[in-house]
Structures are given as structure tokens and as C-alpha cells.
Amino acid sequence: MKCELDSVTVHYEVFGSGQPILMLHGFSCDHRLMTGCMEPIFTHRPHWKRVYMDLPGMGRTNGIDDILSSNEMLEIVDAFVEKVFQQEPFLLAGESYGGYLSRGLLKKRFKQVQGLLLICPTAGQARHDAPEFTIIAQDKNFIERLQNRDKEKFTSMHVVQDHYNWNRFEREILSGIRAADTTFLDRISLRYDLSPELEVLDTPYDRPVLIMAGRQDHVVGYRNQWNFACEYPRASFVMLDRAGHNLQIEQSRIFSVSVEEWLDRVTESQG
């Protein structure tokens, strides 16, 4: 589907019907990162309308010269919400950079957001705090046999390296990376951090929140994410061993159970 905004046409996918959930993927990926981990959860959960957006310069949404920073990227997301959801209440889920934008969008749509899910959210470049990369589990025979031009992207990212993780990485992560406008994203990287006031809420957000972090996440770490959890009175914080920046793949069973519990809490909170 297409959403025509003043400055850009945003591609997005919609599945199901009911209360909407806006899904925001990470930097350089596209909506397939989120459909891959979220859609299996809804096979037995009707009454949710899942909206997966391709951010500008990623997937099938073009990058434009007017977007020079994450602040302006956030303005596009906010305009998308205004056009697609208007004033309808919705849930918000973001992974990595998408989680970063979600925190900014929460400031803008505070009363409208009924629940918040942050998957390995970044805290921006200025507050970067992450451990060194490490491999926890590896199928050496599979890795030795793997012949792919993007093999190094996988082996330098995943802390669990086997056939299952490779298949999902290629399908859900690499597919978006290959489609990204790298020139546009390089420009955004120079002004990656949101203005600090966009992350500071005027009042505590008392809706159900779930924050998930990988103990071995060498991209964004886990300490800043714990600090995020402390900001929200109703936050659950899940830090997983044997999980890096793609914990939704490496710890898929615990990921799914945790998200389902978050959805239950949101439903309960709405009466």
C-alpha cells in the first residue's frame, strides 16, 4: 500500500483488522524485519491490525533530499500516523532505530499510544554503550559450507550461527539491507541522534511497555535499555542470554511469549 504525504510516498503493508499496531523496523532494513518476527504471533490472535511501514530510504520508500536527520525522519513517521490512523488509538512497536523513533513518537502521540514494545532499541550515538562482539554458539560445519557474498554480514552480527539463524537473517534482515539507499542513510547517520527533548516525557507513561535486550548485543548493548525501562512505571524488561542485536531470531520462542504477554497486558489495561 502507499501513503501519499506532502514530501514522500511511504510504502506500507497491512495485515488483519482491529486495533492497529504500528511496526517500525531498524536502520537500513525494511518492514520484513518486523513481519518476520511479529506475524507468527498473530496466527492465533485475531482483532489486531498490523501496520508495517518502510521508513524513507529503506524498503520501497524512497529517500528524499528534505530528510537530513532523525528529527526529520520522525516527522515523516508522525505525518504517516496522522494520515493513516488520524486520532485512532494504536500500539507502537519498534526495533533498534525503529525503537529509537518510537520513543520520539510517544512524546508526540502520548495519549494515542496504548502500549509500547521496544526491541533492542538504540539510545543514539552519543550514548552508545555496548559490549564487544562474541559468538555464543556456532555450527562450524554449516558456516564452513556457507557460500554467500553476504556471509560476513551474518558472521559478524549473529551470536548464534547456524542454518536456522542464517535463513531468517537472509530472509528478514539482508533482504532489506540489499534494498536500502546507502547514500541517503549515510547522510542520516551524520545527524542520527534525536533532539534530547524528544525523548523526555512531560508525564510518566503508564501504559504497558515491553523492552527486550540481548546480553551479547554489540550494537546497542543493554544498559541504556534498562534505563529506558526505569522511565516507564509499567515496563517489563527482558534481557536474554544467547542473544545479540537480532534477539527476535536468536531467541524466537522467548521473544514470542514475551510479546504475547505484553499484548495481554495491553488488552487488560483497556478494560
Image: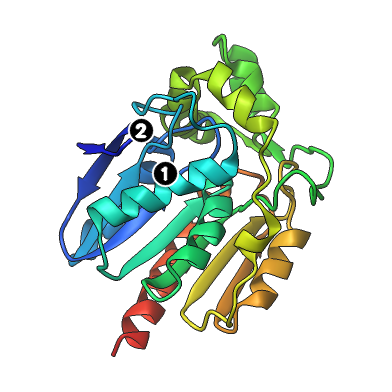
- The answer to whether residue 92 is visible is yes
Q: Which of marks 1 and 2 is nearer the N terminus?
A: 2
Element assignment for label 2: loop
Kind of residue at badge 1:
Ile
Question: In the figure, residue 30 lies in which quadrant?
Answer: top left
Kind of residue at badge 2:
Ser
Q: Residue at x 70, y 58 (%)?
A: 196
Q: Which residue lies furthest to the left in this view?
A: 17
- The label on residue 21 is none
Residue 250 x %, y % = 56, 45
- The label on residue 7 is 2
Mark 1 or 2, closer to the camera: 2
Q: Which residue is drawn at 17% across and 55% down?
A: 16
| Relative height, residue 84 to residue 48 (above, below) | above
Left or right position of 228 against 54: right
Q: In which quarter of the image is the C terminus?
A: bottom left
Element assignment for label 1: helix
Instruction: Name the one closer to the observer, 3 or 172.
Output: 3
Q: Residue furthest bottom?
A: 271
Residue 1 x %, y % = 20, 36
| Relative height, residue 161 to residue 79 (above, below) | above
Residue 31 x %, y % = 38, 38
Instruction: Name the one closer to the observer, 57 or 26.
Output: 57
- Circle 2 Cα neighbour tier, 10 Å, few/some/many (<14 / 14–19 / ≥20): few
- The label on residue 76 is 1
Left or right position of 142 against 60: right
Left or right position of 96 against 207: right
Q: Residue at x 44, y 25 (%)?
A: 64
